[in-house]
Image: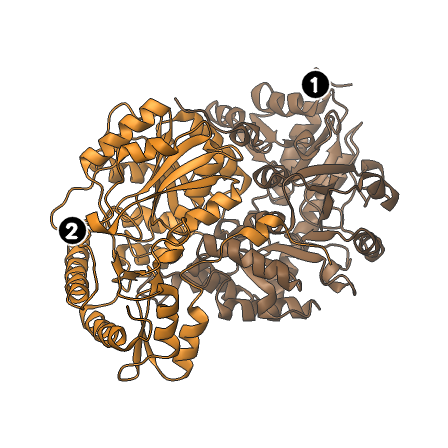
Chain colours: A orange, B brown
Amino acid sequence: MPEISNRGRQMPASPIRKLTPFADKAKREGKKVYHLNIGQPDIETPAVMLDAVKNIDFKVWAYTPSEGTLTYRTKLTEYYNKLGYQIEPSDILVTMGGSEAITIAMQTCMNDGDEVIIPEPFYANYNGFACMSNVVVKPILSQIENGFALPAISEFEKLIGPKTKAIIICNPNNPTGYLYSRSELEALRELCLKYNLFLFSDEAYREFCYDGKEFISPMHLEGLEEHVIVLDTVSKRYSACGARLGCLITKNKEVIAAGLKFAQARLSPGLVEQIAATAAVDTPDSYFEAVNKEYTLRRDTLVNRLNNIPGVTCPNPGGAFYVVARFPIDDADKFCQWMLEEFNYDNQTVMMAPATGFYSTKGVGTNQVRLAYVLNKEDLEAAMKCLEVALEVYPGRI
Amino acid sequence: MPEISNRGRQMPASPIRKLTPFADKAKREGKKVYHLNIGQPDIETPAVMLDAVKNIDFKVWAYTPSEGTLTYRTKLTEYYNKLGYQIEPSDILVTMGGSEAITIAMQTCMNDGDEVIIPEPFYANYNGFACMSNVVVKPILSQIENGFALPAISEFEKLIGPKTKAIIICNPNNPTGYLYSRSELEALRELCLKYNLFLFSDEAYREFCYDGKEFISPMHLEGLEEHVIVLDTVSKRYSACGARLGCLITKNKEVIAAGLKFAQARLSPGLVEQIAATAAVDTPDSYFEAVNKEYTLRRDTLVNRLNNIPGVTCPNPGGAFYVVARFPIDDADKFCQWMLEEFNYDNQTVMMAPATGFYSTKGVGTNQVRLAYVLNKEDLEAAMKCLEVALEVYPGRI
């Protein structure tokens, strides 16, 4: 039997799915499981987007240009230029989800063995994309004590060496929800200019900023045009995770030209999705206002409940729909599994993602958990009641 | 300005698109251009598939499992088991187009620097996927004189070394249309068993076999279960190229388990496409019969017309919807560009793909051209008239 590859062995399994067998078992045993482990929102996709799918009128489900249709890219510039990005359709490569945008960015910009610095905890799939691209992830620790703010620039500089090629930020952050400030981004600009680094800006959660806080992108900063690559997706913006449509945006023409060759190899992004996402740009503001209000309520509910549980620390993040909380426990992996296997309160339990999967440094974040507030307030309250009781009776409580 | 990667520089541009600027210019000048360069059929997508899109009834466009929905994978086994593949849903990974299936197969099975043997001319994007995967393509020449039949096994053995890990066949073949016989596949089975190689079977054109010829897959051969990886797509089967939905099939559980990790990194294939493709499995036989009849007519038209042009040689292939023909010319790249830039007949011209893009060996196939018979008979006749005249007056005729 031929052997699989080293890369096939080394590819990390998804940390948010490794407890799924235990959740499935809990459900088979009749337990109600509140899913706070995944970023699949229950928010409805805008009607204008779904209607565009229902109203397709082509007879041949044909390829589109590899870079995406001009119609869609033109409409996207309308969306981005309202945000002040000042881009043209030719600055955009339409991709199959944000995932493909990240892979293309890594493969276009980084050689085998090159290093990318990422503040941790970070979106776990960056590890997979790095593995696929032979890129080395250099994590830099952000701290729960200051709400997972950007680590000091001096800490970045300690990691920068001849192989350093890029920095990835996810803003607002998955998993911490932290929203980077203008001054943090300006500090990153100086760093990227000083060391001639690419700055990959994963903005999947751009729409989700709370408390009137402003979203700042590296696209808003002057002098960084050749360095910034925005990685985006319609998944969270329109609650359309299953559409698998994203894009890569940069003013760097060399990156666009090389990225296009990766896009050409896989021929085309989806046609129906591009039609739907073109329509989605006209989603009324009222949709986003309602969603924002709903998430603010959920965040407030979750963060308040968590901080009222003895021994629990949870920062109040400015964006996205995740928090990373610290629990008074021995080991988050054990605790999350125990919640599914051993625990129930009124025949209910909660599935959460142990934060260890979001740290690259071993042994860090072992008492931290990521919770996604993708359920309504009532379910969140019920889930928090379960958690409260669980933390009282968990044998590994410390 | 930070530099792009070596891989970004080395990625091959799509050979079927490099003449597009010339075609665009010809169109701006008012010429009618017959597109025989690309595999985008004009055949209508089955109504049952498009209706499924129009009838979606979900409110949240959500992720599906990374391996594809159980509903779709179960329905797919119905399709494949009718062909005698004897597979289960757990033998399938649903992918974003056949392209992703090929990338996952390469990355799961092959280490950096490992070699894959591919009979040439071959589907040009294998080069791109190999570049993305740090895999080395070792081409093995097939000959127009015998219709691009499988090269002798002794020729394969000359190429096999310690780094050889897999063979790719595309059956029926793109670009040659050649349909491999049972005895050719049996010879490949012995070879793969002898040298412990994976056999990647790209079956994108499975539905398109003519003259009553039988399609044989390595899945039909005994003893090769751990070696065979089928790479498939709905693109050509249902004329749904823009759906970007494919799959990887294997009985090798280690490959499925490792491949799933690559699938998990990008989270999910498209939801709407899986709904549509589930419905498409119930496409009536009459659809395929009509399509097959239409393509047979087109192939006969094209092959007859080509062979009646003085100096042109074109084999009569058993499948797919391409031919590779030899022209009495100095250089196919120059000729195809000249057709767009300099030539017109009655204000019409033809866009074709120079075959050099499908050869990995330099200097081979320089007088060969790939033609896709994706237009109706009338347009094909008109295109052939253009070509006939063009070959008379082309300055580089030899």
Q: Residues within 10 Å of mark 2 (few under 14, many from 20)?
A: some
Q: Is residue A121 left or right of residue B112?
A: left
Q: Is residue A202 visible?
A: no
Q: CA distance from mark 2 to mark 1?
A: 69 Å
The image quadrant where one finds the C terminus of chain B is: top right
On the image, numbered disc 1 is attached to which residue? B393
Q: Is residue B310 left or right of residue B383?
A: right
Q: Is residue B281 visible?
A: yes
Q: Nearer the viewer, residue A229 or B246?
A: A229
On the image, numbered disc 2 is attached to which residue? A210
Farthest residue, direction front = A398
Q: Is residue B116 left or right of residue B103?
A: right
Q: Residues within 10 Å of mark 1 (few under 14, many from 20)?
A: few
Write the residue at 12% across / 50% down. Answer: A211
The secondary element bearing badge 1 is classed as helix
- In the figure, residue B88 lies in which quadrant? bottom right
Q: Nearer the viewer, residue B294 or B36?
A: B36
Q: Is residue A374 above or below residue A181?
A: below
Query: Could you say where residue B319 lies in the image, as x and y percent from the top left?
Result: 72, 50
- In the figure, residue A335 lies in which quadrant? bottom left
Query: Could you say where residue A60 lies in the image, as x and y percent from the top left?
Result: 49, 51
Q: Amino acid at mark 1?
A: Val
